Structures are given as C-alpha cells and as structure tokens.
Amino acid sequence: MAVKDGRFGRALAGVRRWWRSSLRVRVITSTLVVGVFLTSAIGAVLYQRIAEGLVVQAVNNAQADAASRVQRAQDLFNSTDRLDNLSLSSAAVENITDVAPGGAGDGRSVVLARAIDSDRDTLIAPVVGGDITAPAVPIELREALAAGQDAQQVYVHPIASRSEPDVEVPSVMVASRVSIPRAGPYDMILIYPMGREQAILDLVSRWFLVGGFLLLMLIGGVAWLATRLVTEPVGQAAAVSTDLARGDLDQRLPVRGTDELAQLGLAFNTMADNLQQQIVQLEHLSSLQQRFVSDVSHELRTPLTTIRMAGEMLHLSRGDFSAPVARSAELLYGELDRFEALLTELLEISRYDSGTSTLVAEEADAVALVHEVVDAVELLTRQSGSEVRISSTQSHISVEVDDRRIARILRNLIVNALEHGEGRPVDVRLCATDELVVISVRDRGVGLNPAEAEHVFERFWRADPARARTTGGTGLGLSIAREDARLHGGYLQVSGLKDQGACFRLILPRSQDIVIDDEPAAVPVDESQDLIPPQLTTTAAEGVL
Amino acid sequence: MRRFSPLAAVVALVLLLSACAGLPMYDAPQPGEPVLGAPDQDIQSQPDLPREGAPADEIWRGFLLANGSSTDGYEVAREYLSDDLAVSWVPTSNVVIRSGDAQVAEIDNIESGTIEATITVDSVLGGDGNFIEFDGEETQTESFTLNQIAGEWRITELPDGFGLWLSETEFDRQFRKAEISYVSATEDIFVSDSRWFPRADGFSTALARALLEPTPAYLDGAVRTGVVEGMDLAAGGVPIDVATSTATVNLRGPGLADDEDRVRMLWAQFTQTLTQVGGVDQVVLQLNGQPLELPEGQEALDSAAALGFETLDPLDEYGLVRNGTSLALVNPDDHALAEMDPEVEGIEIPASVSQKWEALAVDESLSTLAGVDEDRETLWLRGDNGAQQFGNLGTSLTDPQLVGDGTVWIGAARGSTPAVWVLDADAGEDQEPTRLEAEWLTPDLELHQLSVSPDGSRVAVLNHPTDGGADEIGIAGIVRNADGEPIGLAPPRREFAVFETVDNASWATDESLVVLGKRAEDTDVRPFVAPLNDRLEPLGEAPSAQTVQGFLTEAGLQAFVVTTDGTVLTREGAGWQSYREGDDLVVPGK
C-alpha cells in the first residue's frame, strides 16, 4: 500500500486516523449526519406542506370573499340610476369604496378597470382602492379573465404596492367580470396580500431551524451518552487487555449488573482466567522443557563424548581390524558426528519451541559475513562443481544481527544450493535499503514446484528422500534457518521452478529498532530482481526513542 | 454503487430544501368560483345605429327614434351625438311627450346643418319628476345643430334643456309614477308625493334618492320625515338581492341613536316607498355601515304596517242627496244612488235643511251639517250644540267642509285678500276662528273652493285669478302645531295647469281629485278624474253639469254629477245617465 504524498493526502490520512481512532467519534458523527439529513428532509417536507396549506387556505378565503364582494358590486351597478359619464364614474368610486374598503391592517386592494376585450369606449377611468396601481396587475390574469369570464380567475403571484414599488409581496389575486350599464364589461380584481401567511411561514421556518438544531443537539447528546455507556467498558476492556498482554495477568474487568456489558465482562474475565491458567501452565511446561533440554543436553553429551572418544579410538585403530570390523568402526564414527549434529539441532529447535532462544545482536557487516560462509564451504563448492558468485549493491552493509545465527542461515542456504545446484553456478546477492538487508541465494538446479515450496521449511521434510546427502543434513536446517530469521524480526522465503532452480531470500531489518510491518511478497522468479529490495513498510519498534 | 447512494441522497435533500424558499406561487391563473354576472336584460327596443354616410336629416330622425330606447342609458341615441355632447347630454332632465304619430315634426333649414323642428306638446315631465299636461294646441319649436365629424354627420348642439322627445307609448314604456312616502304631521299615516321615474334598473336607487331629498315645498311643515339633513346613500345605489327580494339601503350621515321615533319613520318610509319596486318584498336599512335596529329587533321589514304606519284611504259608505229641504241617505256603491233607511243603518241623519242654506257639507258621522247663505257671507253650522252662525269670516265664502278631525274649513275674501278659516264644529259661536297663515294668498287670487284631503294633510285650493287668467288648482300642505291644530298652509304646487276654467274641484281619494273644468279643447266644462301629478282622465261630457262629486267605494272611484236641472248623473260607459233627482249631492267628510 502506497502512502500518498502532499498536504491533502496528509490531511486525509489525518482524518482517517481520527475517524478510526474512536468508536465514540464515529458513532456521534454518523448519528449527527443521519440526524441532520433526516431533520432537514422532514423539516423541508413539513415546510412545504405548511406553505401549501397556507396558500390553499388563503385562496379559499379570498375566493369566497371576492365572490360576495363582486356580487354586491354588481348589484350596486345594476341599481345605478344615473347613467351619465360623471355619475357612472362617481358610482364606480362609491361602489368600490363600499365593496372593498379594507381596514388599516387589512392590506386588501381592489382594481376596477375596463376589460381588455371590451368593445365599448372607456367611460370610467380605472378605479383603485388600496395601496396598489392598476398596471401592477399581471396581464396574464386579465387575459385569463377575458378567456373565461363566467368564473373567477385566481392567481397567486407576487405583486408590488404603490408605496413600495420595488418590493413584491406574494398575494392572492381574484379577478371577476362585472357589467356596468353603458360602460360595458369591466374587470374587478381583488388583491389579498399574503403578508400574514408569509410571516407565519417565516415563524415556522425559524422555529423549525431552532427545533432542528435542538433536536440535533439532543441526538448528539443521546449518541454521546449511549456510546459512552459502551465505549467506557470497551476502553476498560482494552486497558485490561493491554495489561494482560504486558504480562499483568491478575488484571480483570469490573463487572456490574447483568446486562450485555456485564456478560461481556464476565466472559472476558473468564477468558483471562483461562489464559492466565494456560500461560502459567505453559510457563511451567516451558520451564520443564527448558530444564529437560538442559538436562538432556547435559546427560546426553556426557555419554556421547565418551562414545565419541571410543569411536575415534576405534576409527583410528580401524586398520587393525578386519574389514567388516573396520567398516563398522567407520560407520560408527560417521554416525556419531551425525548424531551429535542432530542432537545439537534438536536442542536448538527445542529452545525455539520453548521460547527460550536468545538473540545476541551486534553490529556486523553482511557482505563480510557472506564471504566468510562462502569461504567456509569452499571444499563443498569444489566438490559440487558449482561456482558461488557473490554480488552486492554495496561493499559494506552494516546490520545489527546475531552473526552466529545469520552465518548458520547462510551456510544452510548455500549448502542446499550447492547440493541441489547440479553443478551450475550459485548466486549470492545482497542489496539493502535504509531499513532492510536482503540476501538471496539462487541456484539453477533441480528447483522446486510450488507445492514443494510450501513444505520446504517443515521439519525433517525432504524434497527427494532418495537424494544423496553429501553433507549429512538432519532435515531441520531450513526450519532452524527460518526461526533464526524470525528471531531477528526478518523473513526467509523461497520460490522456484522445477528443474530450473530455486531462490531463497533472507530479509532482515538493519537494526532491531526496525519492525517490518507486513510479510513481503513472494520471491520474484526473475533473478534480475534479486538486487532490488522489495517495497516494505517499516515502523519503529515500541519503546524505542 | 455504494458511492452513489449518499450522493443521490444529498442531491435529493438539496432539491427538497430548495423548495423551502417561501409560499408557493402559481405558474398561471386558475379558474375559480363561477360569477353570476349581470341579470338578463328585458326585451327592449333596439333602434338602428347611425348608418355610415347617412345625411344630416337621417341622423336627426335616427336620433329621435333612438330616444325611444333607454337601453344602457340611451346608448344608441348617444351614437348620433358628437362625443362631447354624448357625455354631457342628460336625457331624463326634461321629457317632452308629443302627441301624434311617429312622423315627428316639420323640419326646416336642413341645408345649413341646422334643423328646426316643431312638435305638438302633450305634456312635459321635468327633471324634478313633476308632470305637466298641456292642451292640445301647445307647440314647441327647437333648433338642432349638426356637423360633420370624420366625414359623418352628428348632432353637435341640442336645444337648451333638451332631454327627450317621446310619444305617449314610448313615455309609458320608459317611465312610471311612484309615491314617495312621508308621514302625516299628526298621525302615523303616510302622505305620498307622486313623482315620475325612469323604468330602469336604477329605480330603487332613484326612489331612495328622492326620499333623501328635502321635503317638497308644498308639503313643508305639513308632513314629517325620518330623513335627517346630511343623510345620503353611502354606496352608489340601492342593490336588490334577487334571491331574497331584499333591497338594502346603506345610508351615511348623522346618527339616530336615541331618536326611536325617527328610526321608526325612516324604516316605515323606506319600506313603503321601496316595496313599490318590482322584485322588492322587504327592505334592509343600514346607517354608516351598521344595521339600523328596529324596535322589535328585526333585520328587515316587509311592511310599514308592522310598525303601525298605514295608508289612510277610507271608503265612503254613504252619501246625502238634497231635494229642496229634504235629505236622503243614499248608497254611493249603487249606480242609481239607491236610498238607504237610516234606521236600518243605525244612523241618524238631519231630517231637513232650510232652503236658506246652500253648499251643504256633512261630517263623516252625518250628525253635523254646514252650509252658507246665498250671499255667501254667513257660515251656518248645525250639530249637537244646535245651530250656529258665523257672519264675520268675510265675503265670497267658499263651500264649507266638515273634516274628520271635527273642524270646519271655509275660505273667504277678507277685504281684498283671500283667507282660509278653520273652526271647531263643536266649540260654539263664541269661538275664535283660526285664520291660517298663507303668504301666497295674495289679493290677485280669488279663492273659489277649498277641499281638505281625506288624510287631512293637504288642501286643494281652487283660485280664480283676478286678472282673468286660467283658473288654478293648487295642492298645499296643511301646517299644524305641536297639538295637531292647523296653523297655516305651505306654498301650493300647481296641478292640472291644462284647465282654463275650473268650476269645482274636490278630493275623491288621497291621490286624486274630481274636477269640473274646461280645457282649451273642450266646448264646456266637463267632469274629470284628476290624479295628482298625472294626466287627466276625462269623463264623458255632462251637459248642465253644476258639480262633480267623487266617492271611494269598494268598487273604486265613483263619480256623480249634479246638474243645474236638479238631477244626479251616474256614469254609464262613456256617458252619463240620470237615475234620480237631486239639487245637491254631499259626500260626508269631503
């Protein structure tokens, strides 16, 4: 996984870390986000319903009011007794004043104007009652009335007043047709500003916002409280787990009540008890095993030394024996070596199993170490007919290792390569980064198939049991090599192809302060990659300043 | 896919929130409730509009024809006028009813754009609603000016005061008479003033306006009204709710909070006046936007009788026929004036009366008689207190009248000035007769006859001008004091100016007189029924007619003529028939 560079990437990474660092943060944040979404959606739907309801109510009231006023106006016009122009105009003004006076806070206005489809001359100038001008009435309303005279035409639309021509107020406009003697058809438009409805809506929306905010606060608080009820015990469990991991096996979770958290606490404590018991048992077993190893080591070595001495004596004196006896003496001598080596390796494995292996890491030069090992197996190299080629990206690679163990690993790898190399060259390649050292041993012999590669580090496993062992191996070498690598915090991997050879790769941190985060990818088959260190992330070991 | 779900939700939320920008508006006007609109117009005449290219005389004739259509305020007639004249012309300001057929008049001087036309005037209806009838020889010549406007002839100038020229038929179709109701000075009975109004949708409004106008001069002081000075119609008219047949009068003006009597009168007058309008069954009254409360708390009134107001038009059950000195009780409902037995009727009538006394009058109870001597200088009374004589009233005494309130009315010449006297029939000879104040009774008038209306609110005065002019009949209101006693007479309104000679005139009903008179076209006096402010109804010629009397019976108005031959004539068809003899026929109370 690659780390993204740049400020945004770092910020994003910071956010991710913060997000992952606390369950409470995640729960509260998620709850607030969902809460915001839901309250906004619900608030929006309610707001729209209320707004629609207010408009419908205003329209219904306006229609009913306008119907009665228009009828009254028409009755007044029908009863007009004076039909000259001046009297008609006066009557129009008087009628409009009587029909639509509008109280001080009413805001209702009325416009009486000649119908746009009238074929009569204009006998009466437009009459306006209220804070409105005749041209402010939308022309589409007048046109709709001309098209449908038998019914009111209702239009909800903003309209500007005479006193504030730049401010348009949403209003219900109801237009009706009246007939004035001599003057013909006239439009009577009653305008009902919805200032009060708008004020109600504004009030509703303000309180929706306030209520929504308070609701969110409540949701957040509840979420905080709920998560606290969960995360506190979880935190306690984590702290106790940490103490347990550190070795304080007596730590337990406090258990209160009988709820799920109490049950979890009980189960945790039971688990801790069992673990403590097993660890104590294992420790006891380990100490037993340690003592056994030590005892066996001591007890076996003593007779083994005696047997070895006797065997050497016999081997030296084999010339004095008959041929079968001499042969037996040789066999005895050879097997005693092998027995001792096996014993040593078994004890070594035993130490790994019991966890009592110790690492004595000191600064060393990896390149020099490789050379030493190659020099030590020179005889075998000559015998196998292979050539061991050493290549390194650097002449000197410092690494903090237990050189004895690393030498053992290298010796094991190189010997295996020579044994299975079928006389072809064996390459030992070194490369390094600031954090890693990579040593690969590649042969071109019998190779391994993927199934064999999986088993190769198992104890006593041989790819070909019938294959002759020229160096008297015990079958534990690669197992021990991998454990040595692990002890250093490194990795020992293998890959290969049948009849094309195998490549063993040892990856070590350059100091014990460095921890390799993840297991490296498989060893590349292509040998050109041998001198290219794999991309690995490392971290500093805990407790390191 | 998981990545798009939150995005879709956010987009949906943004769209949802974007709709929260305020009150939703309409994209376009929407139809609403149906509108009832103006009522259907009755069938009316539709004269032709001006023809394009018509000559001046055709335009002028077309204008006169269009006078016959009042639709939309004489809209068609206005098309024949210039624009300015069309705006200023008020048709109902002066209506001339012409006699004759459709061929209107002689036309002179047509070439110059001026048309002079002469018509024979039958009668005239002034803008004040007063109707004046003329004799058949009255002509009127007027000048109309026409000019070409945009290539078309139009009338640009009408004669001064020109309103309408109508035939009788057209007039009857366009106008009707209605009663404006006032209240008697002494009682809760209506006194009507008849006027003419256009038959138009504004009839109810016109009636209301007429009622709100000041009391006519001839009734000033003689009647009461609930209308207060400054009171006016708040709206432009008096609308009629067709569904409930209710006329709503919305007044503005001074309040009437504490004056219950005035409120009652106002309700009664408007109800009585407006229920004459077709389609009005009840009236609602509002003052300054608030309902005017009725004493019983009703919201509307359908009859003034509910408030105790009534129209008095008493029937005449009996008549008295005088033959020499004897008096006979007769039935005016009978064409032959059949005699009635007083005992059977439970009435006591005077047995006889001396030949010395003429121009008999009798009260409604038939117990008191009045008369004058042949010199017409002494008033004689005979009642419960016995006989009384009054010789100091003056000369040329008129026929006395015993009125329903127990008073005796008589006119006299006091020196050179006419006088009207009122006496108490029961007060005796020592009483001080009341001379009524009447500044208009000037020495140039000769008081010939007085007749008090049946409701006691008005008096018909028959004057013979001393300069030899036409006899005049005037109706004057009786001014009474707080106790209801007559103290004066209001200036009279002249009626029936068409008469040249009037021998006698007396009330038949509260709204009509019977008159024995002669018009220019008549050869001799003849009887007429004369409705106030209306055309005369000539009754057939009655030779040797001396007086005419009118009785109001269940069958209606019955007129009888007493001849100089000592016969009483009954109307039969278009003529008269004598069924009995008699020197005089007396209507009790009249």
Image (cartoon, coloured by chain):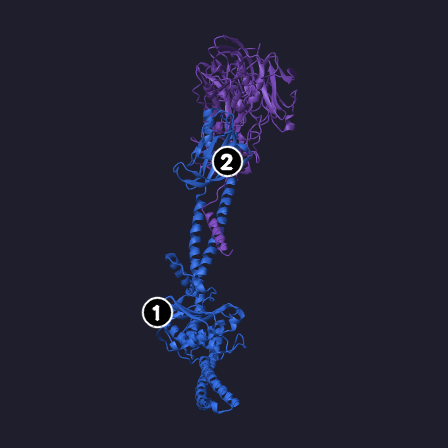
**Host chain of mark 2:** A
Q: Relative to A263, does residue B388 appear above or below in the rendering?
A: above
> Do the residues marked 2 and 1 share a common chain?
yes
Where in the figure is residue B46, as x and y percent of width and height?
Answer: 57, 21
In this view, the residue farthest toward the left is A545
Which residue position is annotated with label 1? A396
Quadrant of the drawing holding the C terminus of chain B: top right
- Check the rendered structure and report the hue given to chain B: purple
Q: Is residue B535 visible?
A: yes
Measuring from the top left, give residue A241's x and y in whole percent: 43, 74
Seen at 51% across and 91% down, the residue is: A322
Secondary structure found at label 1: loop
The foreground one among B495 and B235 is: B235
Q: Tell me the kind of residue under disc 1.
A: His
Amino acid of disc 2: Ala
Which residue position holds label 2?
A: A175
Q: Quadrant of residue B352?
A: top right
Residue at 65% across / 24% down in the picture? B340
Vertical relation: A353 (above or below) B406: below
Q: Secondary structure at mark 2?
A: strand
In this rendering, the answer to whether A10 lies above or below A312 is: above
Q: Is residue B544 left or right of residue B424?
A: right
Q: Is tag 2's residue or tag 1's residue first in the polypeptide sequence? A: 2
Chain A drawing hue:
blue
Frontmost of labels 2 and 1 is: 1
Return the x and y of residue B419 as percentages of the image width and height.
46, 19
Q: Is residue A221 visible?
A: no
Residue B82 image position (x, y, % from top left):
47, 18
Q: B344 or A359: which is nearer to us? A: A359
